[in-house]
Image (cartoon, rainbow, N blue to C red):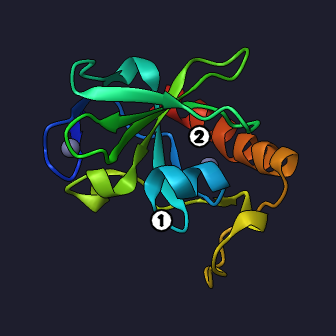
Amino acid sequence: MNLQSQCQCGEAKLNISGKALSRGYCHCLICQEFNQAPCADVAIFYADDVEIPADKVEFVKFTDSAMALPRGKCRACGKPVVEKMKIPGLPAMVFVPAETFADANAIPAPALHMFYHRRVEDMPDKLPKYSGSLRSQLGFMRQLLPAMLKHRQA
Ligand SMILES: [Zn+2]
Ligand SMILES: [Zn+2]
């Protein structure tokens, strides 16, 4: 399966060769700042499946958080393109903003809210909502691990 995502201006394109593991909303302050939005809506992929054009994407680091991931934005339009995540003991993963996919059906529906205590507005959906840094990360793992097993069998 091949997917493509691209930023608003179209300069920074990602070629993706595998399915998304999951998708979720993050309400942390860094995501708010990076996305210039109340929260981030991101799909999660194995990093090995995603080709990042180094000449088009500039990585920035926010250092004041437990979730200080290298975040990549388009060098041309400055919009979020990708975030890298490495959890010890697990394969490297990346987060790709849902809005960069032309076809919303190409990625799964959102499965959870993280860092919900930082929310700008309440979300009226029935998805699990995790507050606090540790509980958010545990909730994320609880969602991610079964998705990883399923991904392997698929
Ligand atoms: Zn976040
Ligand atoms: Zn761009």
Residue most extreme to the left: 10
* Nearer to us: label 2 or label 1: 1
According to the picture, the residue beneath numbered tag 2 turns out to be 147
The tag on residue 132 is none
Q: Amino acid at mark 1?
A: Ala
Q: Amino acid at mark 2?
A: Ala
Residue 49 location (% of width, % of height): 36, 23
Q: Is residue 123 visible?
A: yes
**x 47%, y 65%: residue:** 37
Asked whether 152 or 85 is in front, the reply is 85
On-image quarter of the N terminus: top left
Say whether mark 1 is within 8 Å of ligand 1: no
The tag on residue 37 is 1
Task: Give the Cα distance between marks 2 and 1.
Answer: 27 Å
For mark 1, does the 10 Å Cα neighbourhood hold few (<14), some (14 to 19), or many (20 or more) residues?
few
| Tags 2 and 1 touching, CB below 8 Å | no
Secondary structure at badge 1 equals: loop
**x 13%, y 44%: residue:** 10
Secondary structure at badge 2 equals: helix
Residue 76 location (% of width, % of height): 19, 39
Q: Is residue 149 above or below residue 120?
A: above
**x 54%, y 68%: residue:** 38
**x 67%, y 31%: residue:** 63
Say whether mark 2 is within 8 Å of ligand 1: no
Using residue 12 as the reference point, say whether residue 120 is left or right of it. right
Using residue 63 as the reference point, say whether residue 84 is left or right of it. left
* Location of residue 86 by image quarter: top right
Q: Is residue 2 visible?
A: no
Of label 2 and label 1, which has the lower sequence position?
1
